[in-house]
Amino acid sequence: MKFSTKIESLQPSATIELNSKALELQNKGYEIVRLTAGEPDFETPQPIINAAYQAMKEGKTKYTDNKGIKELRQKIAQYINKKYSTNYNENNVIVTNGGKQALFNSLFLITNPGDEIIVIDPSWVSYDAQIRMVGGIPVHVKATKENNYIPEKKHLENAITKKTKAIIINSPNNPTGVVYDKEFMSFISKLSIDHDFIILSDEVYDALVYDGDYTSMANFEKSRDRTIFVNSFSKTWSMTGWRVGYTIANEKIITQMAKIQSHSTSNVNTPSQYAALKALEIDNSYMVKEFKKRRDYLYAEFIKLGLTFHKPKGAFYYFIDISKYGLNDKEFCEKLLEYGLAVVPGSAFFCDGHIRLSFAASMNDLQKAVEILKKFLTDLETERV
């Protein structure tokens, strides 16, 4: 049986694959600390759960407008308008099955075969795969830790060709935790206007910022009409399994996306939409405070261990350079798993010689992880002597 060559050439999501492997070991009785998936350990706030339950009791279990219920689209627009001084309305919003579908719909809509999409590395595992799935060509631009994982402007400019259709911007960034400053975001805004391409802005971690101010691509009015804004309820309100994301863009784009969704998934799970409607009223500051506490704890411990890394300003990941230990990142992760700690190799994010470690886990798990790392690194040093 022959399958699509585009799909056969893809690798599964490394983060999901490694998380599944760690879960499998746990189910076999092994004690594994899983710092693989970007999934908050907090329970979904009870009022959100209650809202979904109430919706079901009221018979709100049927199809909805495939763009999402009007009340939710209105409330999302109001929420973003308040945060970023924009003027969106419900016709600028489509509710999607998580942030991944929001991204996929966007790429599927704008990409013709051979179109180039610029991606800044290290980059989230699904960008490259989704671009290839829709027939586009990913163009990777490297950003280094020496430059705070912000790509050099000349490198971005050199990556632009007549085939450039869009650039993907991810801030706060997965896997590095970098938060792009206003000056860099302004540069991207101007670049998109000067070269007539689309900005696909993935801001699913915009509510998880620990230091300094946050600048959204939605803040730039001149490029707003060519910006597709992707977000999700998963990280902000610990709703990963509820599968609710959204896209905000000009009305023409949203109308076209609605056609895609009408022929693929139809509407998002109806009770989940009512849960998301309630979520927009819930203060998540206690989660942010706890994530910051965990980040700061790991920062102090990693300094003691002599690890090479950059302190994340947002999201909930540490991206650590392990190249000095004489193992490639996959070998490092495999050996570390034998010690009981699961993390993701940097090569999954197009940056060899690194690992990504999530601190969206309990403090107890993070403390265990530090002890495992300490023993593992000590043993590695002993082997090398």
Image (tube, rainbow, N blue to C red):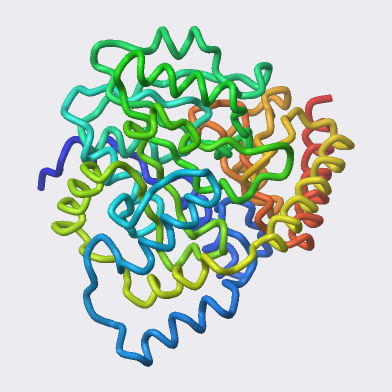
Quadrant housing the C terminus: top right
- In depth, the one of 256 and 112 nearer the eye is 256
Q: Is residue 24 above or below residue 212?
A: below
At horizontal 60% and vertical 74% (from top left) the residue drawn is 45
Of all residues, the one furthest to the bottom in this rendering is 57
Of all residues, the one furthest to the left in this rendering is 1
Tell me residue 194's x, y (percent): 35, 13
Q: Is residue 97 visible?
A: yes
- In depth, the one of 21 and 299 nearer the eye is 299
Q: Is residue 275 above or below residue 286?
A: below
Q: Is residue 28 above or below residue 102?
A: below
Q: Is residue 22 left or right of residue 125?
A: right
**Image quarter of residue 324:** top right
Q: Is residue 374 left or right of residue 44?
A: right
Q: Is residue 80 left or right of residue 2?
A: right
Tell me residue 110's x, y (percent): 23, 34
Tell me residue 159's x, y (percent): 38, 12
Q: Is residue 252 left or right of residue 239?
A: left
At horizontal 47% and vertical 81% (from top left) the residue drawn is 51
Q: How many marks?
A: 0
Tell me residue 361's x, y (percent): 68, 59
**Image quarter of residue 113:** top left
- In depth, the one of 146 and 333 nearer the eye is 146
At horizontal 83% and vertical 43% (from top left) the residue drawn is 374
**Image quarter of residue 375:** top right
At horizontal 48% and vertical 10% (from top left) the residue drawn is 155
Q: Is residue 148 above or below residue 66?
A: above
Q: Is residue 348 visible?
A: no
Of all residues, the one furthest to the right in this rendering is 304
